[in-house]
Amino acid sequence: MRYQIFKILLLAGIIATAWNCSESAAVQEPASKTTTGGLDIQIPQNIVVSEPSYFYQLGTSYYVIAPTTMTVSNGFGKVIGTFNTSTGAIMSLSGDIIAINLDLSKLPVVAPTKPSKNLIAIDLDM
């Protein structure tokens, strides 16, 4: 009698483990989403950078911080300000503070996009 109960409990445990493993694999997030502080941030696909850059979103505005020059551009590539590393502030070109106390280590990074190998260079000065 004890042997039959043990077999039933063992089978139930194996089934429960298999069920939980299959559930966790189906709930994974897409690779393009980044979670920061409990908030889901969707990095737009049209942002193009030449070096790995930090991405910051404030409302509907996108800011990209270039780490070598600490310049800040909007989502369209136009330079709109600078980043101060000592205060963690994004300052506009006119001196207005856009955001403050940003920690670059907690911001998602936008990787540079590689050009397509199908591009053909044409010399127009023939």
Image (cartoon, rainbow, N blue to C red):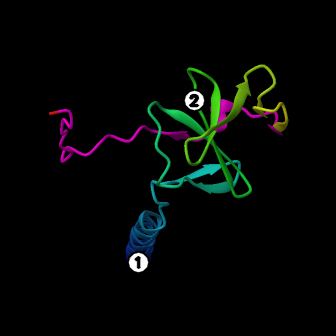
Horizontal side of residue 109 vs 126, given as left or right:
right
* Labels 1 & 2 near each other (Cβ < 8 A): no
Q: Residues within 10 Å of mark 1 (few under 14, many from 20)?
A: few
Q: Give the residue displayed 38% in from the left and 78% down from the top.
A: 4
Q: Give the residue displayed 47% in from the left and 64% down from the top.
A: 24
Q: Give the residue displayed 77% in from the left and 28% down from the top.
A: 88
Residue range in magenta is: 98-125
**Which quadrant of the structure image shows residue 6?**
bottom left
Where's residue 50, x and y in %? 44, 33
Residue behind mark 1: 8
Mark 1 and mark 2: span between their CA atoms? 60 Å
Q: Residues within 10 Å of mark 2 (few under 14, many from 20)?
A: many
Locate the N terminus and report the quarter of the image it occupies: bottom left
| Position above or below: 25 against 91 | below
Q: In terms of sequence position, does the residue under pointer 1 or pointer 2 come before the other? A: 1
Secondary structure under the numbered disc 1 in the rendered image: helix
Q: Amino acid at mark 2?
A: Ala
Whether 102 is among the magenta residues is: yes
